[in-house]
Amino acid sequence: MDLRVVCTRVKNSLADPVIRWKVFALMGGKMIGLALVLAAMKIFIAPAVYAADGPTPEINALNTVWVLIAAFLVFCMQVGFVMLEAGLRAVARVDQHPRRGHRRHLPSAA
């Protein structure tokens, strides 16, 4: 849609008092909802608590272990996706090749 058309439609819509009232009511309701959410966050979310001392060596070791395990799982997922894509490409090539077997044709029920 052209920018001039959009500007004309917005001007015509805002000139109509019924549409203008609906837009302001909708925006007012959204602002009230946002204010309520922010007030609830201020009341119910506790302030951050920091540890007095730094992390212990055991905690550092556990953090390292879970990061390494997560990285290993990501590497495995990438290999799995590559194998999935390769299999889908092979099936697509077999289905498109005219001299190879027809894999999608099923025996008729008649």
Image (cartoon, grey):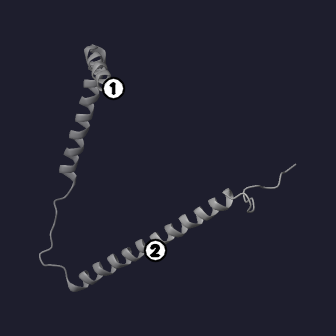
Q: Which mark is residue 12?
A: none
Q: Is residue 9 left or right of 75 when viewed as pictured? A: left
Q: Amino acid at mark 1?
A: Asp
Q: Residue furthest left?
A: 52
Q: Which mark is residue 2?
A: 1
Q: Residue at x 30, y 18 (%)?
A: 13
**Within 10 Å of the Cα at label 1, are there few (<14), some (14-19), or many (20+) other Cα atoms?**
few
Q: Secondary structure at mark 1?
A: loop
Please provide percent x and percent y for residue 15.
25, 14
Q: Residue furthest front?
A: 99
Image vertical order of residue 75 relative to residue 32, above or below: below
Number of callouts: 2
Q: Amino acid at mark 2?
A: Cys
Depth check: 85 or 27 in front? 85
Q: Nearer the viewer, mark 1 or mark 2?
A: 1
Q: Quadrant of residue 92?
A: bottom right
The N terminus lies in quadrant = top left
Q: Quadrant of residue 2?
A: top left
Image vertical order of residue 43 relative to residue 5, above or below: below
Image vertical order of residue 73 relative to residue 39, above or below: below
Q: Residue at x 38, y 78 (%)?
A: 69
Q: Is residue 51 left or right of 68 when viewed as pictured? A: left
Q: Is residue 41 left or right of 2 when viewed as pictured? A: left
Q: Which mark is residue 76?
A: 2
Q: Is residue 22 left or right of 45 when viewed as pictured? A: right
Q: Residue at x 88, y 48 (%)?
A: 110
Q: Secondary structure at mark 2?
A: helix
Please provide percent x and percent y for residue 81.
50, 67
The CA span between labels 1 and 2 is: 48 Å
Q: Residue at x 22, y 53 (%)?
A: 44
Depth check: 40 or 24 in front? 24
